[in-house]
Image (tube, rainbow, N blue to C red):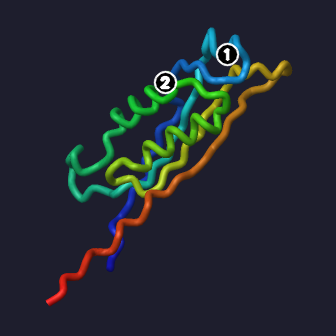
Amino acid sequence: MALSPTARLTLTGLRARGFHGVLPEERALGQIFVVDVIADVDAPDHDDLAATLDYAALARRIVDHVGGEPCQLIETLAARIADDLVTTDRVHRITVRVHKPDAPLGVDFTDVSVELTRTAPAAPPPIERQR
């Protein structure tokens, strides 16, 4: 059985406001989170949006998660995003990195982030018909 060709779609630096964190001020004031996504997807064999992943729709789903139900950990936020996006048609594998550049660490730093990867469940083998 031949594997279908795949493409790697990368979305970098998506910024959205969320209210995630442990501290009360993080929950009350919110802050900007930055999300990067790498998706291994079916490669289209023709120039048709319907034959590939709509990255504008993907971006909207990420923004909905960042602005959605607060969580304490960016690990939880990254998992929510990855678990949702890996269920998308044509997605085989997805890596999500969530950055929290304004995390209240009390020291000077550039960025803190977490990255995780999810793989789409394998499709079940076709059912053979008995004769």
Point 33% across, 67% down: residue? 4
Specify the amino acid type for callout 1.
Glu
The secondary element bearing badge 1 is classed as: helix
Measured as percent of width and height from the top left, residue 82 is found at: 50, 44
Q: Quadrant of residue 26?
A: top right
Question: Do the residues under discs 1 and 2 have CB atoms within 8 angstroms?
Answer: no
Q: Residue at x 55, y 33 (%)?
A: 35
The residue depicted at 38 percent of the width and 54 percent of the height is: 41
Q: Provide the residue designation for mark 2.
A: 68
Mark 2 is on which residue type? Gly
Q: Nearer the viewer, residue 12 or 62?
A: 62
Of the two numbered discs 1 and 2 on the same chain, state the one appearing first in sequence: 1
Q: Residue 78: image x %, image y %? A: 57, 38
49 is higher (above) or lower (below) than 102: below
Name the residue: 23% across, 82% down.
128
In the drawing, does residue 34 fall left or right of residue 50? right
The x, y position of residue 100, in whole percent, is 66, 27
Q: Residues within 10 Å of mark 2 (few under 14, many from 20)?
A: some
Determine the image quadrant of residue 62.
top left
Farthest residue, direction right: 107
Q: Residue furthest front?
A: 130
Q: Nearer the viewer, residue 17 or 77?
A: 77
Q: Which residue is mark 1?
A: 26
